[in-house]
């Protein structure tokens, strides 16, 4: 077990992750019909990102993910930013999350028994840059070397900003997993987790069995946890069982609500199981080896608050920063 996870697992058995950043921004009135998605808010209204981070900390998240999932250098430059400006946006994503965490921690009650929360720099897949739903298909035609070059500088800039962790998330293809593992193995920096988006209870979106993808993660010392995210809740238990047979690393599970994303209409289609599925199944996921548990798209602070109460058996005992609404 990596030292960065040990205090949480020793104290409470799990690390509670946050939920969907874009989901809560939309709930607060932001319109995210933009190729940069939630990262677009950093350009004009970065304070809204900090508000959402604080809401998740108040709800009980032990780890918040930065607003950099869709903030690739290529995507920001396509918007018209210079390379220097694009790199500044990436750094700002870590700075905003770190400031929100530090403000929250400074305001906590003296009797609070929480472990000091973590900031994870989100690294989304190449498909997030394409903004066409490719992270739910994994069908982009790039080889390992091209994907390494796509991810390399963004990862370097995010690491320079000083996050506690790196979250390489929503990875839909074996080729991209190989690229990220090679890159993490070649570079120095904070520990990382790697989590995959899956089409069913067996395989990534490109058809690769999750067990095969996890075998690729083992050589990288920086990878301290592996698992699944932005996957329908009903598939998670099967995926965790398969993952436990393939790796001894702590497992990660932060599914979406089960709804499907329509990349043309830029909206979620009805039919998911909602936040109840997340909360109702989280204890099973913990029993199957998940040690980092939270939510992804279409989940919010209310679900994270309930999830923490279910996993830890009580309220989150958090401070409410001045001016922040209750969740």
Image (cartoon, rainbow, N blue to C red):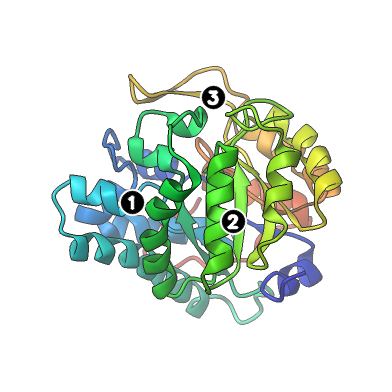
User: How far apart in space, not on screen, are marks 1 and 3 (Cα)?
Assistant: 25 Å
Query: For residue 181, which numbered disc appears in the image?
Result: 2
Q: Position of residue 143 (x, y in %)?
A: 47, 41
Q: Earlier in the sequence, mark 1 or mark 3?
A: 1
Measuring 20% from the left and 61% from the top, which residue is drawn there?
83
The residue beneath circle 1 is 72
Q: Vertical placement of 115 versus 192: above or below? A: below
Task: Decide if residue 288 is in sight here.
Answer: no
Of 285 and 144, nearer the camera is: 144
Labels 2 & 3 near each other (Cβ < 8 A): no
- Give neighbour class at mark 3: few <14, some 14-19, many 20+ (Cα, 10 Å): many
Of 194 and 114, nearer the camera is: 194
Element carrying mark 3: loop
Of 25 and 142, nearer the camera is: 142
Is 118 situated left or right of 153 in this image?
right
Task: Decide if residue 249 is in sight here.
Answer: yes
User: How far apart in space, not on screen, are marks 2 and 1 (Cα)?
Assistant: 18 Å
- Give neighbour class at mark 2: few <14, some 14-19, many 20+ (Cα, 10 Å): many
Q: Earlier in the sequence, mark 2 or mark 3?
A: 2
Q: Nearer the viewer, mark 2 or mark 3?
A: 2
Q: Quadrant of residue 288?
A: top right
Q: Quadrant of residue 171?
A: top right
Q: Quadrant of residue 111?
A: bottom right
The residue beneath circle 3 is 259
User: How far apart in space, not on screen, are marks 2 and 3 (Cα)?
Assistant: 29 Å
Measuring 81% from the left and 46% from the top, which residue is drawn there?
246
Q: Position of residue 153 (x, y in %)?
A: 36, 62
């Amino acid at each position: 077990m990596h030292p960065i996870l040990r205090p949480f697992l020793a104290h409470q058995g799990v690390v509670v992750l946050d939920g969907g950043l874009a989901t809560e921004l939309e709930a607060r009135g932001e319109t995210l019909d933009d190729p940069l998605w939630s990262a677009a808010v950093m350009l004009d209204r970065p304070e809204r990102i900090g508000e959402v981070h604080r809401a998740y900390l108040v709800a009980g998240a032990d780890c918040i993910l930065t607003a950099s999932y869709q903030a690739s250098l290529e995507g920001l430059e396509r918007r018209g930013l210079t390379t220097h400006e694009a790199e500044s946006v990436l750094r700002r994503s870590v700075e905003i999350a770190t400031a929100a965490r530090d403000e929250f921690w400074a305001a906590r009650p003296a009797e609070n028994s929480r472990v000091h929360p973590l900031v994870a720099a989100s690294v989304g897949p190449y498909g997030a840059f394409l903004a066409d739903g490719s992270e739910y298909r994994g069908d982009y035609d790039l080889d390992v070397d091209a994907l390494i070059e796509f991810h390399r500088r963004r990862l370097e800039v995010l690491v320079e900003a000083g996050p506690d962790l790196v979250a390489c998330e929503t990875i839909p293809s074996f080729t991209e997993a190989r690229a990220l593992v090679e890159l993490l193995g070649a570079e120095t920096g904070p520990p990382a987790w790697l989590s995959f988006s899956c089409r069913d209870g067996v395989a990534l979106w490109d058809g690769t069995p999750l067990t095969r993808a996890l075998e690729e993660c083992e050589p990288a010392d920086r990878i301290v946890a592996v698992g699944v995210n932005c996957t329908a809740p009903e598939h998670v238990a099967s995926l965790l069982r398969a993952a436990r047979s393939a790796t001894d690393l702590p497992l990660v599970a932060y599914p979406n609500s089960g709804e499907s994303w329509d990349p043309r209409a830029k909206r979620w289609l009805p039919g998911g199981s909602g936040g109840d599925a997340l909360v109702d199944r989280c204890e099973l996921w913990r029993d199957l080896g998940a040690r980092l548990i939270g939510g992804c798209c279409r989940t919010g602070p209310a679900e994270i608050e309930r999830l923490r109460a279910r996993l830890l058996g009580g309220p989150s005992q958090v401070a409410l920063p001045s001016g922040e609404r209750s969740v």
